Image: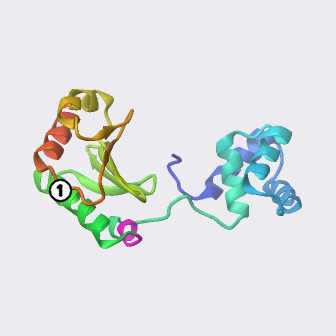
Amino acid sequence: MATNPDRASYFPAIEKKYGQPMSYWFAQMKEIADRKYPEQIAFLRENHGFSQAHANALVLYSRGSLSSKKYNTVDQYLAQFDETKQTTVLGIIKTLSTKFPKAEWVIAWNQPMLKYKDQYIFGVTVLRNHILMAPWSTDVLNTFLPRLSGYEVNKKTIKIPVDWMIDAKLLKDMVAARVAEF
């Protein structure tokens, strides 16, 4: 993720790498404005050698999305979800905030992340039918596999139901193990 969420922050690099001013690239986008997103991306990649990141920034900017940042706060993120999902995520946040008061909940990649000493240590993503938790460490995830037998565990995440009964001990232990890594 770019440090600056503004899509225009890519423009100096685009001009330098692809040898044309942004006015040229905006004119190119205007000519293909009627095409679908994947076609516009393909046009820039195939015809002009754009990287995926540069193509994405230009296409989305041209479509009116000036920033990749959608939410500034956890409350803004949660506002889009029903009460059950909000209650579950707020329970996770409260549990971890109480145990790790020096850690801070931030929005990164447009989702709530717990950050400690400039490191992400835990993340939560709300989806339609479930919630994903991520301890930000495959070692931590693998260590806790025996305690996660009732859950679907993916490569980097744990799937929980939207109405999950908070397992405070599991949450605290996983985050403590993550913090112990540094």
73 up-or-down from 134: above or below: below
Q: Is residue 135 visible?
A: no
Q: Quadrant of the C terminus?
A: top left
Residue occupied by mark 1: 165
Relative horizontal placement of residue 76, taking residue 89 as reference (left or right):
right
Relative horizontal placement of residue 26, taking residue 111 as reference (left or right):
right
Queried whether the magenta region covers residue 78, the answer comes back as yes
The spot of residue 131 in percent (x, y) is 34, 53
Magenta segment boundaries in residue numbering: 76-80
Which residue lies at the image location 39% right of the left edge and 32% below the top edge? 155
Q: Which residue appears farthest toward the right when viewing the image?
A: 31
Amino acid under disc 1: Met
Queried whether the magenta region covers residue 144, the answer comes back as no
Q: How is the image coloured?
A: rainbow
Q: Between residues 60 and 140, which one lies in front from this camera angle?
A: 140
The spot of residue 130 in percent (x, y) is 36, 54
Q: Residue 165 lies in what quarter of the image?
A: bottom left
How many neighbours does mark 1 have within 10 angstroms: few (below 14), some (14-19), or many (20 or more)?
Answer: few
Q: Which SS class for mark 1?
A: loop
The spot of residue 16 in percent (x, y) is 75, 42
Q: Between residues 45 and 5, which one lies in front from this camera angle?
A: 45
Q: Is residue 37 visible?
A: yes
Main SS of residues in magenta = helix
Which residue lies at the image location 82% right of the left edge and 58% below the top edge? 35
Relative horizontal placement of residue 113, taking residue 92 as reference (left or right):
right
Which residue lies at the image location 78% right of the left edge and 52% below the top edge? 40
Q: Residue 174 lies in what quarter of the image?
A: top left
Relative horizontal placement of residue 49, taking residue 147 as reference (left or right):
right
Which residue lies at the image location 62% right of the left edge and 57% below the top edge? 7
The spot of residue 3 in percent (x, y) is 50, 49
